[in-house]
Amino acid sequence: MYLRGSKWSMTRRRRPINFFRLAVLLVLIGAAVYVNQVVVPTTPPLFIPTPTPTRDPESYVADAEQLFTAGKLTQAIDAYKQAIKVEPNNASNYVDLARIQIFMRDYQNALANAENALLINPNNPVAMAYRGWAMYFLADYSGSEVALQKALELDPNNALAHAFYAELEGYKYTLDNDPVAMNKAIEESRLARDLGPNLLETHRARALVLDWTDNKEEAVAEFQAAIAINKNIAELHVDLGTVYVALGDDTQAIEEFNQAIPLNPTDPLPLTSLARTYMRMGEYAKGIQYAIEAVKNAPTDPYMYGNLGSVYYSNKEFDKSAENLRLAVRGGTTADGKTVQGIPLDYTLRVQEYYNRYGLALARTNQCGDAIQIANALLNGVPNDETSVYNANEMIKICQDNLSGKNTPFPTQPSGTSQ
């Protein structure tokens, strides 16, 4: 039978199956399924950058530790910051960063990082100890004591907390000669060293206490022990140099100060220490040179201007002395627009030195209105200090002689100089 109008016929012969083509087709289908299920999910989208592999935070920490040991503290700080970016919940990295920032005298950031560590773990005794130490350097002595006592509550054998507590108590002694504070400082410094004989902080604290109790030779030995642990901490060399100054060993002192400068080039303290050492030795040109460099490093620090003015005074450059000591005592604005806060008068030897020499420099340059004001400030503010009272009367005498036309010789009495 046939259907009209159609090419299709039930009796039409079928073409034989081409098994080769069928096999090829099956292979192509299988390949398409594989690509869709396996390859596509693992292929990044087009035109999107491939992510950079994340570096192991431990590698940053290892780098930081090596840099710290090598005395490259700025680079060590950067390495710890990188470790924190990769692993922001690791409290120990914040603690180690705070420690280095304290050695770099960056106390505000050190405090912030110690507190960051405590946010992660409020019961971290080491973080609490460094928090207390940073607060001590920021002159928050009551806050420092609270933090250090808390650290010792968390861990009574915390050598760092004992060391920092010894330093705090020793400083209290220097303020008012409180024997109770000094006995506490001695006890805490010995305990700290016994608990942490391999920590430079414990030897440093013990050395400071020995220095404050006039055991200078023993202080030298403890500072040297701290330096043996890490010879690349600038502050340790400055502290040791200061003890050498007290012992009258200017050569060793200058060597230590010079070692400190390249370890922390932006720190004005080694430069200031050199300036004052050369001033005491009578090498005023060198002293002025280092004091100027110290001012450049800390252009808003009134003590830097005080030291520079003091060296100028020793060199009898009274105009320049008065100019710089004015910034130290009264504060003001520098030639390049920096604001300096004046130092209030107290019984601190260095502060009295600045006031004494400022008033004498004013008197010698016939600025007697200001000189008499400084004289009265000394007589009323520190009446129990014989040197300041003498110098105040000397200012008045010089101004009286200026009015009468007399020439006033350079005073033979000491004018409050201290190292």
Image (tube, rainbow, N blue to C red):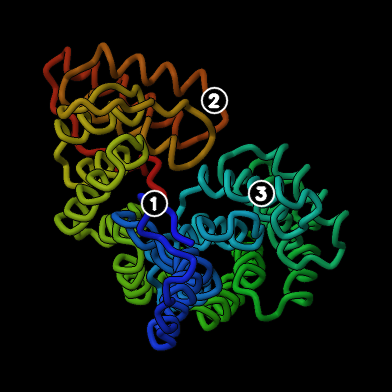
Cα–Cα span, label 3 and label 1: 103 Å
Q: Which residue is mark 1?
A: 4
Q: Are marks 3 and 1 in contact (CB under 8 Å)?
A: no
**CA–CA distance between discs 2 and 1?**
137 Å
Local crowd at mark 2 within 10 Å, few (<14), some, or many (≥20)? few
For the residues labelled 3 and 2, the Cα–Cα distance comes to 38 Å
Residue 146 seen: yes
Q: What is the secondary structure assignment of the residue under circle 1?
A: loop
Q: Earlier in the sequence, mark 3 or mark 1?
A: 1
The image's mark for residue 131 is 3
**Disc on the earlier residue, 3 or 2:** 3
Type of residue at label 2?
Pro
Q: Amino acid at mark 3?
A: Arg
The residue sitting at 66% across, 80% down in the picture is: 198
Q: How many C-alpha atoms fall within 10 Å of the one at disc 3: few (<14), some, or many (≥20)?
A: many
Picture coordinates of residue 46, whole percent (x, y): 32, 57
Q: Residue at x 18, y 30 (%)?
A: 408
Q: Nearer the viewer, residue 306 or 49?
A: 49
Pointer 2 residue? 383
Residue 54's label in the rendered image is none
In the image, 293: left or right of 382?
Answer: left
Disc 3 + disc 2, Cβ < 8 Å? no
Residue at image position (27%, 49%) is 294
Identify the residue shown where x is 47% and y is 71%: 11
Residue 176 shown left or right of residue 51 in the figure: right
Q: Where 184 sits versus 228, above or below?
A: above
For label 1, the crowd category at 10 Å Cα-Cα, with few meaning under 14, some 14 to 19 and many 20 or more, is: few
Q: Amino acid at mark 1?
A: Arg
Q: Residue furthest bottom?
A: 20
Indicate the quadrant where residue 208 lies.
Answer: bottom right
